[in-house]
Image (tube, helix red, strand yellow):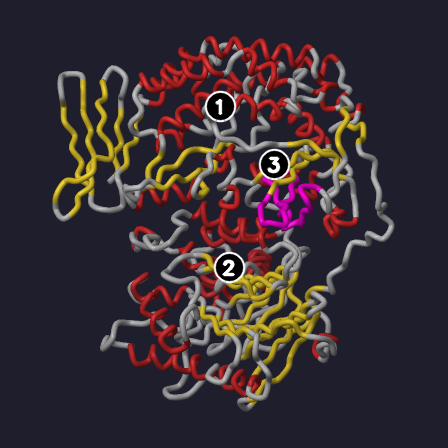
Amino acid sequence: MKLFKYLVIASCFTVTSCATFKAQYLNEADKTNQLPNKEINTTFYLIGDAGLSPQGEMSNALTAFNNHIANKNTEGDYTIFLGDNIYPDGLPEKDAKGRAQAENALDAQINSVKNFKGEVLFIPGNHDWYSNGLKGLKRQEKYIEDALGKNTFQPENGCPLESIDVNESIQLIAIDSQWYLENWNHNPTINDECEIKTRERFFEELEGELKKAQGKTIVFAMHHPMYTNGVHGGQYAISKHLFPSQKKIPVPFLASLATQIRTQGGVSIQDRYNERYNNLMKRIETIAYDTKNLVFVSGHEHTLQYIETERIKQIVSGSGAKESYATLGNNGLFSYGKQGFAELTVFKDGSSWVTIYGEENGEPKQLFSKMIFEPLENYDVSDLPNTFPQEVTTSVYSKDETDKSEFFEAIWGERYRELYSTDITAKVATLDTLYGGLEVVRAGGGHQTKSLRLKTKDGRELNMRALRKSATQYLQKVLFKDKYIEDEFEKTAIERLIQDFYTAAHPYAFMVVPDLSDAAKIYHTNPKIYYIPKHKHLGKFNKDYGNELYMIEERPEDNYTDDRNFGYADDIESTHDIIEKIRKDEKYKIDENAYVRARLFDMLIGDWDRHQDQWRWAQFNQENGDKWYRPIPRDRDQVFSNFDGALLDIMKVISGSTKQLQVYDEKLEDIEWMNAAGVKLDRVLVQQATKDKWLEHAKFLQENVTDEVIEKAFSKVPEEVQDETLADIKAKLKGRRSNLLDIAERYYNFLNELVVLTGTDKDDYIEVTRTGDDETNVKISRIIDGEKAEVIVDKTFNKDLTKEIWIYG
């Protein structure tokens, strides 16, 4: 029995002990494959962990690489050093111990590309952070850029992300994966020079860059691999079950135990299954999973590997100076544990190949070559018609999708379900003629909508969003950020249920908002409804778009600064940008009056989905140099929502967050939850507005959003759905208008229970004064030349209302 137990334990350890230095192949034919004879777009030479060379010389891999490119035409190509550019501890200060050795390591890599005619790029690895963190990393950046020129070390300043336009068909995205893994408490100034200041913002920006690069081949360079079958991925040689350390002292059972703990436990943050490392890779994989023609290139492992999963392609090239063990694992096509480098070749037809070279007597030796991506396929538009009717009769959903039993409607509510299958008459439009001719920039899409970004001939951009929302897209973006699930839920009961859930939003209510906004003196877009058929000008996007109803509206940006509905602004900014500017300097100011009025208008029309990306900001330059910002609300598809049904009523009692899904009515009783998506932004931007100001703007809306304005606005909804439901919404809107003073006062009181006051990132003078038994005054002023200057905040709070004041300066 004991023998059996030992055999079981031994077999468990053996599972992780088949890694070797030798070349391993899933397919022997990949040993001898040759690149096809066709026109090359760009070649990327990939060499990582090259930060250790003999004094005055280059490592074997660098020597082989240098000889490999010696007689090649490398103009327009890229060499990427994939991190760990210096061993063991980054670049010390001048005259410090280890400085000469560190410089030698960098010089060896720099010398290897001395005659390279293309672009050279160094990205950081974990060892590059080991010399006093951010300071040491910046020293290395300066050293490399002094030798090779500006922008040869990316991302710069210890920031996490850089996206580089290689050419019209290739995008290079470089990230500093160690930035994410770092303990920021040890580097408190890590993000001072970066636009991205949080890990969540990093993922948002990364997703945006991948969207922008759609249709291109994307080379995604980061030091830490997403997939690996080396030591950091838990694969060890049999010898490690005898000798766990550098000392050659055999400790058979304890060695296996130590190896198994590291393999499965993720004890080191540099190992693939460490919690933080795993979180990083899961989010990146989910974001990138549906992106076509994307290949990850990494180092970290002192091996050469090529790995493929269903959607992910991973090149590991980390044996630029060191050697280690690797295996094929479950997803590897090739592995090799000795020094060498990799080559990624992108052809003009969109296809890509990887070639991996070892080193033999200072010369490159091809070990592996395989196609990664097939040539790009064009959508066949030859059978699509050239002419279309001026109008069509259609609906968002079919009758089958909205026909529900009485029991279903009792549980899930009536919503606006019938309107989704009501036929309307819609204008037919094709992109070659609409707005004078439109070009598709790229696919877009928020949490729910399938969309395209379009561009006019004069460079203005518009959004084209399908009225039929995507249930699987919602699940992916909101509930499953760490795992790709869209394929799993297509054509399932869950997808159908979420598709029905969307019927709580009136399908055409957004059309009433422009006229209401004009009366309220609030900036707005001007959405229009069109039926867009599949047609030749839609090109490759015919595969996923066309033959349905779309809403097309302006995308507020600087090309729209001469538009009346955006106030003839001097510029248009995002919420993220204006918050950064407000922190940076007191000359940037929010027009709180305009924002308070806009927020009360949100409450008037029941628009509960007001997170920060639902706003753009019109900038107005003042004569004294100040810049004022006024809000431009966008994405009004949730106005007048009707989240009825017994199940949601029960859920609202059990789960607080469900309370933001309300039935539009006259009173707006649960004002806190209705504003849950917007309250954080309100606390950041509303610093000075008093209760009187809130009530003043509520009264303004009561007086200006008149019955006549409401009737005119609602007449813009398609005639076929101007029914009793719409009349009911109008009646409730007029009732809520009557209650707006009460709504304003209640929200002001809620907002002022917890107050957040902020100064700038410069020197501020903060005064907190008890002005009486019940009142506290907070004054925040700038300090200029050692003296108090402009007052940023000056407000008095009563303890009967305000319970907490958070002050940042």
Query: In the image, is residue 451 part of the stretch drawn in magenta?
Result: yes
Which residue type carries mark 1? Asp
Task: Answer yes or no: is residue 750 visible.
Answer: yes
Which residue type carries mark 2? Ser
Q: Is residue 115 above or below residue 168?
A: below
**Is residue 330 or residue 543 the one in the foreground?**
543
Name the image quarter holding residue 238.
bottom right
Q: Secondary structure at mark 3?
A: strand
Image location of residue 112, percent across then percent down: 47, 83
- From mark 1 to mark 2, how far is it between C-alphas? 36 Å
Give the residue drawn at x 48%, y 14%: 668
**Is residue 744 or residue 307 the one in the foreground?**
744
| Residue under pointer 2 | 163
Task: Answer yes or no: is residue 15 visible.
Answer: no
Q: Secondary structure at mark 2?
A: strand
Q: What is the tally of numbered marks visible in this picture? A: 3
| Residue under pointer 1 | 602
- From mark 1 to mark 3, how far is it between C-alphas? 19 Å
Most extreme residue toward the right is: 383
**Is residue 134 or residue 70 the one in the foreground?**
70
**Circle nearer the N terminus (1, 2):** 2
Give the residue drawn at x 72%, y 77%: 33
**Circle nearer the N terminus (3, 2):** 2
Give the residue drawn at x 54%, y 67%: 230
Q: Quarter of the image containing the N terminus?
A: bottom right
Image location of residue 728, percent across then percent down: 62, 10
Magenta stretch in the rendered image:
434-461
As drawn, is 454 to the left or to the right of 688? right
As drawn, is 681 to the left or to the right of 353? left
Pair 1/2: label in front: 1
Q: Is residue 9 above or below residue 346?
A: above
| Residue under pointer 3 | 553
